């Protein structure tokens, strides 16, 4: 992303209401929400919401789409942004992780000691997470797409990563940390109960998200979903999960 665009995006998200709006739209995913729905969920007055949506749209974080008589707002899917020469999907994932992995969350004690301040420690954590999640390795292969020409493409987990999935990954990791803290308190281990979100929590949550959740869209949205990942629906004849042998599964953890 160009430096000017990064500055504009960070400036837009520096206001609490705009950050809440952006988070809600990221979690909602493709299709977005009408202004009335956003206002109702967040308790923001319509005139105020209109101003915040305009600021987010100006920063390139939100787009407007007309559906009949209603206008929907949504946060562009990471792969929609990838189509822009100024946007890289990994950069998009990094930014969204940073929105959810805030400085005020509890983190593993070892992580907090990695840098001079928690912000820098979180940045290092995110880079390590992305290094694993975006690696073109066998265990990260997820789908096989068969085209009419007979060609078969392999999609990796990172190819399907979206803002909504990242939000869910962080929520899972929070849940793991909470359960661990409760268990440690029950055992009387006060030192361990101070531990928070760890790198392992986030990596396991990433794997679990693709195992337990339905990544595929409803049948009536398949065409739009294929377009989001840069495929012409007319050229796709089959989509199937990548099959792994037991050896690969044991290396990849949760599959």
Image (tube, rainbow, N blue to C red):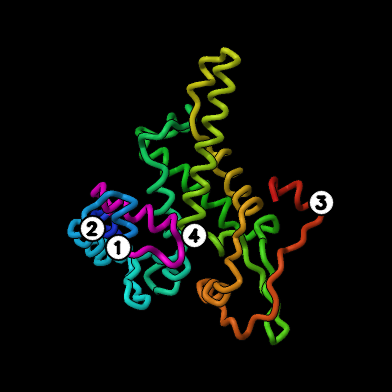
Can you identify the residue that label 3 sits on?
246
Q: Is residue 27 magenta?
A: yes
Does any portion of residue 1 appear in the rendered image?
A: no
Can you identify the residue that label 2 sits on?
49
Task: Return the mark for residue 35.
Answer: 1
Q: Are marks 1 and 2 in contact (CB under 8 Å)?
A: yes
**In front of the other: label 4 or label 3?**
4
Can you identify the residue that label 4 sits on?
162
Q: 31 or 112, which lies in front?
A: 31
Q: Mark 2 to mark 3: distance in Å?
A: 51 Å
Q: Are marks 4 and 3 in contact (CB under 8 Å)?
A: no
SS at badge 1: helix
Q: Earlier in the sequence, mark 1 or mark 3?
A: 1
SS at badge 3: helix
SS at badge 2: helix
Q: Quadrant of the N terminus?
A: bottom left
Q: Residues within 10 Å of mark 2 (few under 14, many from 20)?
A: many
């Amino acid at each position: 992303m160009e430096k000017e665009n990064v500055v504009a995006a960070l400036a837009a998200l520096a206001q609490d209401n705009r950050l809440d709006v952006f988070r809600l739209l990221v979690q909602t995913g493709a299709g977005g929400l009408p202004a009335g729905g956003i206002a109702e969920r967040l308790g923001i007055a319509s005139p105020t919401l209109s101003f915040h949506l305009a600021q987010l749209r100006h920063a390139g974080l939100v787009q407007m789409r007309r559906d009949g008589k209603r206008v929907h707002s949504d946060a562009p899917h990471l792969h929609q942004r990838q189509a822009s020469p100024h946007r890289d999907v990994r950069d998009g994932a990094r930014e969204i992780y940073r929105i959810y992995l805030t400085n005020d969350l509890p983190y593993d004690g070892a992580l907090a000691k990695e840098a001079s301040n928690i912000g820098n420690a979180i940045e290092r954590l995110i880079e390590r997470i992305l290094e694993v999640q975006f690696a073109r390795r066998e265990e990260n292969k997820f789908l096989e797409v068969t085209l009419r020409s007979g060609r078969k493409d392999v999609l990796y987990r990172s190819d399907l990563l979206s803002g909504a999935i990242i939000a869910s990954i962080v929520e899972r990791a929070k849940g793991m940390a909470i359960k661990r803290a409760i268990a440690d308190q029950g055992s009387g281990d006060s030192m361990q109960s101070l531990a928070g979100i760890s790198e392992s929590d986030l990596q396991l949550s990433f794997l679990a998200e693709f195992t337990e959740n339905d990544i595929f869209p409803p049948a009536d949205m398949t065409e739009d979903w294929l377009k989001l990942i840069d495929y012409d629906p007319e050229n796709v004849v089959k989509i199937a999960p990548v099959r792994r042998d037991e050896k690969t599964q044991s290396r990849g953890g949760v599959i």
